[in-house]
Amino acid sequence: MTQPLDSIENPFVALQGADLEDRESDPLDLEEFPGDIPTVVLPNKVIALEAAGRTDVGESRQHNEDFFVIDHRVTQIIAPDDMSLYSRGLYILCDGMGGMPKAKLQAD
């Protein structure tokens, strides 16, 4: 069963049983790090990528004058022996300068 990493008390313990054959480093000897949790070297593979945006009117304004655009494109190539994920994006944020004349029009 998969669960979010931030919901696991000790992510290193959860990853010990994971399939990490693709990692390039040698296995860690935990006795070298008494009381410390070492950094886990994970495979350099992206399996998912998301983009999101959000604005907030705040506490002192009646309307939101911010504007954003996300143009996010992901290409996934799946073959019997490999999977590749390519991503590119254009992220634009226009701060409406709350309270300024025609700020909403300028942001849009």
Image (cartoon, rainbow, N blue to C red):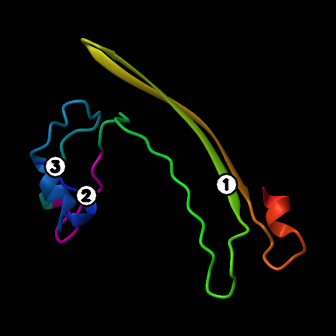
Report how far apart the C-alphas of labels 1 and 3 lie in the structure. 33 Å
Magenta-drawn segment: 32-41
Q: Is residue 30 above or below residue 2?
A: below
Pick out the residue farthest to the top. Answer: 80
**Front-lying residue, 59 or 5:** 59
Disc nearest the viewer among 1 and 3: 1
Q: Residue 5 — which label?
A: 2
Task: Please give the name of the residue rendered at 27% of the width and 64% of the height, measured from the top-left corner.
Answer: 6
Residue placed furthest toward the bottom: 60
Disc 1: which residue: 68
Callout 2 crowding tier (Cα within 10 Å): few <14, some 14–19, many ≥20: few
Residue 54: horizontal and vertical position, in percent?
56, 62
| Residue 41 location, quadrant | top left
Q: Amino acid at mark 2?
A: Leu
Q: Secondary structure at mark 3?
A: loop
- Magenta stretch, main secondary structure, is loop
In the rendered image, the vertical position of residue 63 relative to residue 14, given as above or below:
below
Residue linked to disc 3: 2
